[in-house]
Image (cartoon, rainbow, N blue to C red):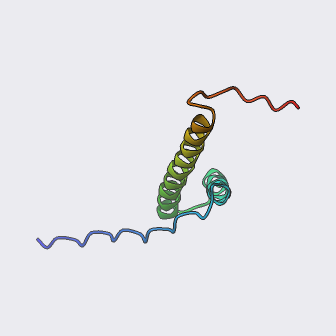
Amino acid sequence: MPKTPATPAPPTAPAPVSYEAAMQELEALVAGLEGGQLPLDQLIVSYQRGSELLAYCQAKLQQVEQQIKVLDDGLLKPWNPSP
């Protein structure tokens, strides 16, 4: 019995240009997923892209947190936005 060809992997989407762009794309993906109108294949692709974007955003936030720790001599201080 011949083997069925494997489904080719979808092309990799480009990395976001910024945290804000990633969040905007992620919000659009979530809205599409919550809408319930996407076909199954598109749901899977959207979910995978959302996972990639989430990992990107988490990594960016972690980088910023590390930079803040360096600036504050290794101590992460509570945020106090009042002037």
Q: Position of residue 23 (x, y in %)?
A: 65, 54
Residue at (70% x, 26% y) in the render = 78
Is residue 17 left or right of 48 when viewed as pictured?
right
Residue at (49% x, 60% y) in the render = 40
Which part of the image, by quadrant, shows the C terminus? top right
Q: Position of residue 80 (x, y in %)?
A: 78, 28
Q: Position of residue 67 (x, y in %)?
A: 58, 42
Q: Where is 32 relative to 67, above or below?
A: below
Between residues 55 and 65, which one lies in front from this camera angle? 65
Is residue 21 left or right of 57 when viewed as pictured?
right
Q: Residue furthest right?
A: 83
Which part of the image, by quadrant, shows the N terminus? bottom left
Q: Residue furthest front?
A: 73
Residue at (52% x, 47% y) in the render = 59
Q: Quadrant of residue 29?
A: bottom right
Q: Where is 67 relative to 6, above or below?
A: above
